[in-house]
Amino acid sequence: MAERPARRTPKAQGARVVRTERITPHMVRVVLGGDGLADFALAGFADHYIKLCFAPEGADYAHPYDMAKIREEYPREQWPTTRTYTVRSWDPVAREMAVDFVVHGDEGLAGPWAARARAGEQVTFLGPGGGYAPDPSADWHLLAGDESALPAIAAALEQMPAEAGGYAFVEVPDAAEEQKLVAPDGVEVVWLHRGDRPVGEPLVAAVKGLEFPEGRVQAFVHGEAGFVKEIRRHLRLERGIPLAQLSVSGYWRLGQNDDAWRAVKREWNEQVEREQESNA
């Protein structure tokens, strides 16, 4: 078996918290700025993301973290923990980057941090990465996601040409979590309130019940892995949409924390692809 190439340690970048804003009861926006973003740039994707680095309690290294040095000199349990978040917006003139966080009390790592972040606080992050942008040549667009995908969906809507058409289905717990989105007139934004139903159930029903317009669709489906798998299967097997027209990813998985999900995510995605392609 061929050896895997050595894993390259990404370069970390530093920034500071400029301000925070509670957008909805469970969504907090943290705006990052500072000299560390002097060379920061995006490549035009709607799903640009960064990996925020959180040092364990008692760590004695300073921002921005030297990840290569830390991995060389410290035991693994003292390495920073990373959490991946979409870049909601980037202002190249002000050199400010906005990142939105879903917050559920003290649950998780990044959410509670965002809820208590204060101006001037230093942060370290890796990135940006990304891979999806609205295709201006698509006949129509289909966007579907839960609140974890809302920042990317909002950014995608803002990037679409004025004449774009399609549907954006966004599932949130209730009406209080809705946000004002800027979208082309031809794209219908549909808010789905989950309530007490399982996450993704309203999204799956909405996509399966949609009367697809004529023409070539470009689809973006992101969020909890269970419903992402089900919608992907529907789009591939029942609608016959080619893989090249799909951007599909499980951002998280019900019942698993972020570390556990990331450990199996690639294998899970590959297995889903194999299963569905064998039935295509």
Image: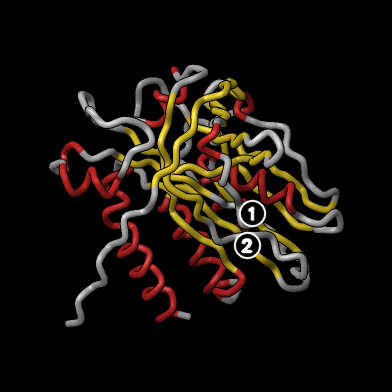
Identity, as a three-letter code, of the amino acid under mark 1: Leu
Q: Quadrant of residue 258?
A: top left
Check disc 2: other Cα within 10 Å, few if <14, some if 14-19, many if 20+.
many
**Residue 99, image x and y in percent?**
55, 35
In the rendered structure, the answer to whether residue 185 lies left or right of residue 207 reads: right
Residue furthest left as drawn? 75
Query: Which residue position is annotated with label 2?
Result: 219
Can residue 157 be seen here?
Answer: yes
In the rendered structure, the answer to whether residue 91 lies left or right of residue 139 reads: left
**Residue 155, image x and y in percent?**
66, 46
Picture quarter with the N terminus: bottom left
| Residue 162, above or below 83 | below
Query: Which residue position is annotated with label 1?
Result: 143
Observer-nearest of 252 and 57:
57
Can residue 150 be seen here?
Answer: no
Identity, as a three-letter code, of the amino acid under mark 2: Ala
Q: Are marks 1 and 2 in contact (CB under 8 Å)?
A: yes
In the rendered structure, the answer to whether residue 218 lies left or right of residue 222 reads: right
